Image: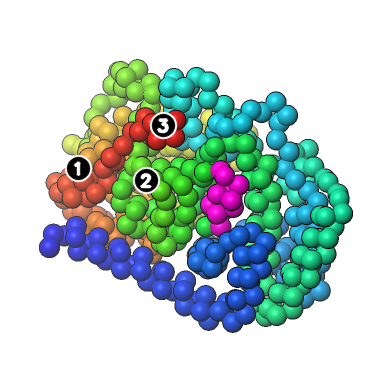
Amino acid sequence: MSKFDVTMSSLLSRKKEIEIYNKAIFDKRYTVNFRYVEDLFGELFSLNKIIIKDSYLAFIRESYSVSKQHILLELSSRSKILSKIIGIAFCFIMRFTYYKGDKNESCGGICFLERYDNRFYDELIQLINKKKPETNIRICNDNKVMDVYGKKIGVSFNVKQLSFFFKNIKMVLRVINRLESYQRPIFLKMFRLNVLYQRFYMGMSRFDYIIDSRDNAYLPFQNSLANNNNVKLILIQNGARTDLLMYGYIRCFMFVSWSDIYKKIIVGDIESDSFFSVLPSSMNRMDAAKTKQEYFKKNSKYDFLIVEQLDYPESGAGADYFNHKYMLSRVVSFLIDHPEYKVGYLCRHSRDIKQDNIRYDVLRENDEILLKNNIAIIERKFCEWAIKSSKVTIAINSSTRVEAFMVGNIGFSVSKKMLPYDWIIKILPDEFSSINESQSVFNEKMLSVLNLDTSDINAAMRTQHTMLDVVDEII
């Protein structure tokens, strides 16, 4: 058995541990009275028991109490009276409101849910327009999907709806009465999301496909609700998701991933009719030839490339900032002893910071250290070619390490504290699983990583498809 087989086996064991833990939490807290939840969601939303349970496991996997709405729902659901009021409110929304589409929309086509960073959308839309120009394409603002009310939300009353409204209230209140106080938060969260997403998919049923890149935020029941309204859900992986806890229980018509390895490591598995692995657009830019020519006019090939998202203490991400300082100090000390190696630095966050911004001094201090130690500063638009042309990419808990392996190079972590569920660390040989040692040991590892054989990892991370294959499947 190769070293990679051993480390991959360890990674899959960690994935299994998470699944067992999630199931143990479910069995301990939610099994009692769960049949009432199953009956309600089965009747109201046509969800089968497996999907309902998978959705609960997905809720357990990730924290849904980040937003103000979820915090409010969490606190309110502890009170049975407030829980009933919330339940009645969403019965009203379910029966008397609807999601309005544009009047001039034609049937069929594809709806893209707009996100902050849609890595594949531009390329995908261009390929679709090239293959079938008449395809109906719409970009939908995702922020409107979860609106309780607003311009996109209509209201409708009739006697039949009123009858169903009172019937639904009885059903929901019956379940709330039977649930324990600690069981109500997830129930109400799931009820709320089912109501809002069912309304959205009903309003978007004129489309053949809905494409979304917020893949890790989807819950299994959403695929069922889309199918109930004859819409096929396509999820596109947005980011490498290097933390196992960030990803899981994916259910959709088609999943477009970065690599085939995700089929094995995703907690709760990926269940889809089609699966494609496509190199992310950051590593396969449409203007690649032009960018490559411009890159090598200004830069050379580097032995080590530092790529990270430099955050600052005042931004609420202080831990990443201090990890960055730790990493940079280690690399600088290494270069003092080994000046023969070329090192480049690339920051994926915008460096366009005004002088009156408190972050300005932090950035200037960072650049002074880089320039003083002969570390080249690379523009972030050159990320693709910087990673492809460098032997080793160094990063902090970042997707950049995944991209490095995908193009046949090495991704390396330097951080004062490693994430316990960082799967990139898990697939590296044991001697590279921790970098928090003395400077002399760190120097040895930096030298040895240049000659590290990662061919098994590179093969496992290689993509099998192109975005054109995805287009051929749906057009």
Q: Quadrant where the C terminus lies?
A: top left
Residue holding disc 2: 275
Q: Nearer the viewer, residue 461 or 377?
A: 461
Query: What label does residue 471 carry, if any?
Result: 3
Question: Please, what secondary structure does the residue beneath circle 2 have?
Answer: strand
Q: Dot 3: few (<14), some (14–19), or many (≥20) neighbours within 10 Å?
A: some
Q: Residue at x 86, y 50 (%)?
A: 158
Query: Is residue 225 one of those drawn in magenta?
Result: yes
Q: Earlier in the sequence, mark 3 or mark 2?
A: 2
Q: Which residue is mark 1?
A: 338
Q: Is residue 288 left or right of residue 88?
A: left
- Residue 263: x percent and y percent? 34, 53
Return the x and y of residue 124 as percentages of the image width and height.
Answer: 45, 30
User: Who comes first in sequence, dot 2 or dot 1?
Assistant: 2
Report, in whole angstroms, how far the alpha carbon at label 2 lies from the one at label 1. Answer: 45 Å
Disc 3 + disc 2, Cβ < 8 Å: no
**Crowding at label 1, few (<14), some or many (≥20) Cα neighbours within 10 Å?**
few
Tell me the amino acid under the disc marked 2.
Answer: Phe
**Which span is picked out in magenta?**
221-231
